């Protein structure tokens, strides 16, 4: 049961990570003499807008979303292996456990790197007049939640399970006789009350 819950948690972490990829990581708004401009950072680029109606989007030179996408793919694969569980061959047990840990680890590392960038960008305060408001976007919080759920799923997936046994050669079992009558390798069984001399010809 714990293993099934772990597989569901891995899949939920993948879904949350995909949702976080499409949401802003943080938004910074500056107000000066009634003039407003804002910059929004996502996993794929930045967006700039102003109160005059001007807006511009530019891609990031470093695509932070790529390792997150890779982690999502690994989480989905790990989910399939964990849920299949005992129906898979025995040699898949170790790779499944490793993948169930590696996938969340890759997601956590990617989100940690992006989180450091968000902290640095949010901490910039070079404004000399006016006011500035910086908020962490819901995309960042969604990615953090994805890391927590995926990690929990990876730990639950470590529950030991019995894999399907490997096919072996045919085994022939000898059924016991109903009585203790001895049966020679070839020929009819000889009852103990009948001597071998009487039963032998001539």
Image (spheres, grey):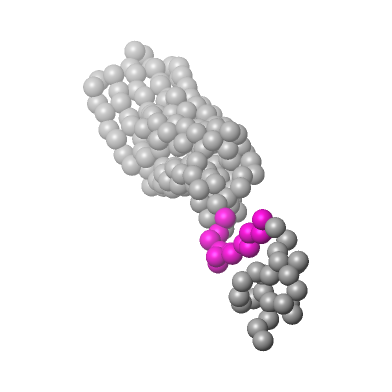
Most distant residue in the left direction: 53
The residue located at (53%, 55%) in the rendering is 89
- Quick check: can you spot residue 31? yes
From the top left corner, tell me how far across and down residue 188 is, in percent: 61, 71
Most distant residue in the bottom direction: 202
Most distant residue in the top direction: 34
Taking the image as shown, residue 20 lies to the left or right of residue 35, namely right
- Quick check: can you spot residue 120? no
Taking the image as shown, residue 120 lies to the left or right of residue 15, namely right
Asked if residue 177 lies in the magenta stretch, the reply is: yes
From the top left corner, tell me how far across and down residue 19 is, in percent: 40, 31
Picture layout, residue 109 above or below residue 142:
below
The residue located at (73%, 61%) in the rendering is 180
The residue lying toward the viewer, choosing from 31 and 199, is 199
The residue located at (61%, 75%) in the rendering is 187
Picture layout, residue 202 above or below residue 172:
below
The residue lying toward the viewer, choosing from 180 and 46, is 180
- Highlighted range, magenta: 165-178
From the top left corner, tell me how far across and down residue 25 is, in percent: 44, 30
The residue located at (53%, 61%) in the rendering is 167
Q: Quadrant of residue 151?
A: top right
What secondary structure predominates along the stretch shown in magenta?
Answer: loop
Picture layout, residue 119 above or below residue 50:
below
From the top left corner, tell me how far across and down residue 193 is, in percent: 76, 66
Taking the image as shown, residue 121 lies to the left or right of residue 171, namely left
The residue lying toward the viewer, choosing from 129 and 55, is 55
Asked if residue 110 lies in the magenta stretch, the reply is: no
Picture layout, residue 84 above or below residue 33:
below
The residue lying toward the viewer, choosing from 75 and 52, is 75
């Amino acid at each position: 049961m714990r293993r099934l819950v772990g597989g569901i948690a891995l899949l939920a972490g993948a879904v949350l990570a995909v949702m976080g990829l499409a949401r802003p990581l943080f938004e910074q708004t500056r107000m000066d003499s009634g003039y407003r401009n804002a910059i929004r950072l996502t996993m794929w680029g930045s967006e700039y807008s102003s109160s005059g109606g001007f807006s511009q989007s530019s891609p990031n030179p470093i695509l932070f979303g790529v390792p997150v996408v890779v982690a999502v793919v690994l989480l989905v694969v790990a989910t399939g292996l964990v849920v299949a569980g005992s129906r898979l061959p025995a040699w898949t047990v170790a790779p499944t456990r490793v993948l169930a840990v590696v996938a969340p680890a890759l997601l956590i590392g990617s989100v940690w790197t992006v989180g450091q960038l968000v902290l640095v960008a949010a901490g910039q305060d070079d404004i000399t007049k006016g006011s500035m408001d910086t908020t962490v976007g819901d995309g960042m919080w969604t990615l953090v939640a994805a890391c927590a759920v995926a990690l929990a799923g990876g730990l639950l997936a470590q529950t030991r399970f019995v894999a399907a046994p490997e096919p072996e050669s045919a085994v022939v079992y000898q059924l016991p006789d109903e009585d203790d009558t001895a049966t020679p390798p070839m020929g009819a069984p000889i009852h103990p009350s009948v001597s071998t001399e009487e039963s032998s010809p001539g």
